[in-house]
Amino acid sequence: MINKDGLHIIKAGPEDAEAIIEYLNIIGGESDNLLFGKGEFNLSVKQEQSFISGINNSANSIMLLGKVNGEIVSVSSLSGYSKARIAHRGEIAISVKKSFWGQGFGTAMMKELIKFGKETAKLEVIQLEVKSDNEKAIHLYENLGFVKIGTYKKFFKINNKYYDAYLMNLYL
Ligand SMILES: CC(C)(COP(=O)(O)OP(=O)(O)OC[C@H]1O[C@@H](n2cnc3c(N)ncnc32)[C@H](O)[C@@H]1OP(=O)(O)O)[C@@H](O)C(=O)NCCC(=O)NCCS
């Protein structure tokens, strides 16, 4: 889709399933900010393939891969809801491989998702949940216009310790 500082952003397809699983199992161990830790992303290749096909068959959802020299360095998605009364909303998930943090890749991926949400999916609200101590991600989201709309107490339970999350929305 675009090229920014060597970052090539493309739409994920079922053929990317194996590489995506490998990527997610690595980045799960690079921070405590995701819903899974190292080696905890346990979908099979077949399950991941059908997950990606489901996204690609949905008019208001997309999964994007950020690649540098063919290597996946970011996976992000925007999932629009299908039920009529919440079909104006979608949810974002994003990660960048640690060795590529701080180069604007997260921002570039988010901008592509927001563009898709606005122009193609015609969404009105994009939402996300972020660990309340994930200052970098919160900064990135606020830069793009997201606002905190609430705190979800005890959102995460990691090694028997609870962590809150902020609910953040972007009103398009
Ligand atoms: C959050 C994440 C996606 C950011 O990706 P990235 O490519 O490093 O982000 P960018 O380089 O585009 O932007 C980071 C911004 O945070 C800022 N930043 C960096 N460290 C920071 C800190 N400790 N506190 C506040 N802001 C910080 C940078 O200056 C930059 O802002 P700027 O554009 O105003 O200069 C990435 O760190 C990641 O994948 N983390 C682990 C998984 C995760 O947290 N995902 C989000 C779950 S909600």
Image (cartoon, helix red, strand yellow):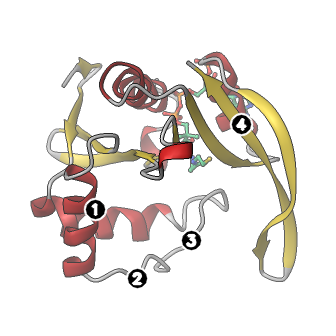
Query: Which label lies toward us, 4 or 2?
Result: 4
How far from the left and from the top, in percent, is residue 172? 55, 18
Residue 11 vs 120, above or below: the answer is: below
Residue 86: quarter of image: top right
Q: Amino acid at mark 1?
A: Ile
Q: Residue furthest front?
A: 84
Mark 3 neighbour density, 10 Å: few (under 14) some (14–19) many (20 or more): some
Left or right position of 153 against 87? right
Question: How much space separates mark 1 and mark 2, taking CA atoms?
Answer: 12 Å
Which quadrant of the rendered structure holds the N terminus? top left
Question: How much space separates mark 4 and mark 2, taking CA atoms?
Answer: 27 Å
How far from the left and from the top, in percent, is residue 5? 29, 19
Residue drawn at (58%, 30%), measured in percent from left and top?
125
Residue 29: quarter of image: bottom right
Res 92 seen here? no
Res 124 seen here? yes
Question: How much space separates mark 1 and mark 4, taking CA atoms?
Answer: 26 Å
Residue 168: which disc? 4
Question: How much space separates mark 3 and mark 1, taking CA atoms?
Answer: 14 Å
Element at label 3: loop
Q: Nearer the viewer, residue 119 or 159?
A: 119
CB of mark 4 near ligand 1 (< 8 Å): no
How far from the left and from the top, in percent, is residue 128? 62, 43
Asked if the residues shown at circle 1 and circle 2 are in contact, with their CB atoms under 8 angstroms apart, the answer is: no
Residue 143: quarter of image: top right
Q: Earlier in the sequence, mark 3 or mark 4?
A: 3
Kindly identify which residue carries mark 2: 42
Query: Which label lies toward us, 3 or 4?
Result: 4
Kindly identify which residue carries mark 3: 36
Q: Nearer the viewer, residue 62 or 72?
A: 62
Kindly identify which residue carries mark 1: 20
Q: Amino acid at mark 4?
A: Met
